[in-house]
Image (cartoon, rainbow, N blue to C red):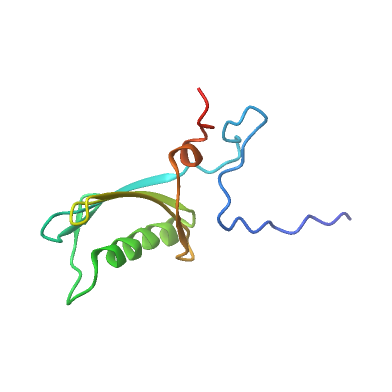
Amino acid sequence: MSQLPAPRDEGNLPAPRDERNLPALSAQPLIRLDAYVAEDGSTVVNGHLLTMGGTRPPNEAILDAVAMFARTLGAPVAATVIDRTVQQVARLRVHPDGSSYTIADAEDTGRSGRA
């Protein structure tokens, strides 16, 4: 009986690609969420207003909410965060274990950046 290879730690690796740099058929689709921080600090994730209680920073509340989605799905989740309080846009990938990192447009869509 042959042994199966040990499972790979996907960690922060992008989705697997085929020889044409397209997502492999076995690649799980990446769920995308949108988050918004208004000028007054109110915070919304995918249309749901977050109650942050006390002095909790909006970015922590957003990261916790997106991590909860990832844990529930058992798969990484991409999030675009628009923060009007600091006039910034960030794109994140959050994993079920709560780890996260920023992603570039080309990495998220599979485009190489070349025309």
In the picture, measured across the screen, residue 47 lies left or right of residue 5, that is left
Q: Position of residue 104 (x, y in %)?
A: 45, 43
Which quadrant of the figure has residue 10? bottom right
Query: Which residue sits furthest top?
Result: 115
Q: Against 19, is 42 above or below?
A: below
> Which of the 4 image quarters holds residue 100?
bottom left
Q: Position of residue 71 (x, y in %)?
A: 44, 62
Q: Residue at x 47, y 41 (%)?
A: 108
Q: Is residue 25 left or right of residue 72?
A: right
Q: As drawn, which residue projects farthest toward the left?
A: 40
- The x, y position of residue 77, in whole percent, is 43, 51
Q: Is residue 109 above or below residue 96?
A: above
The residue drawn where x is 22% and y is 56% is: 86
Judge from the rendering whether residue 17 lies leftward or rightward of residue 71; answer left or right: right
Q: Quadrant of the N terminus?
A: bottom right
Q: Position of residue 12 (x, y in %)?
A: 55, 55
Q: Nearer the viewer, residue 36 or 31?
A: 36
Please give the name of the residue rendered at 18% of the width and 56% of the height, measured from the top-left corner. Answer: 85
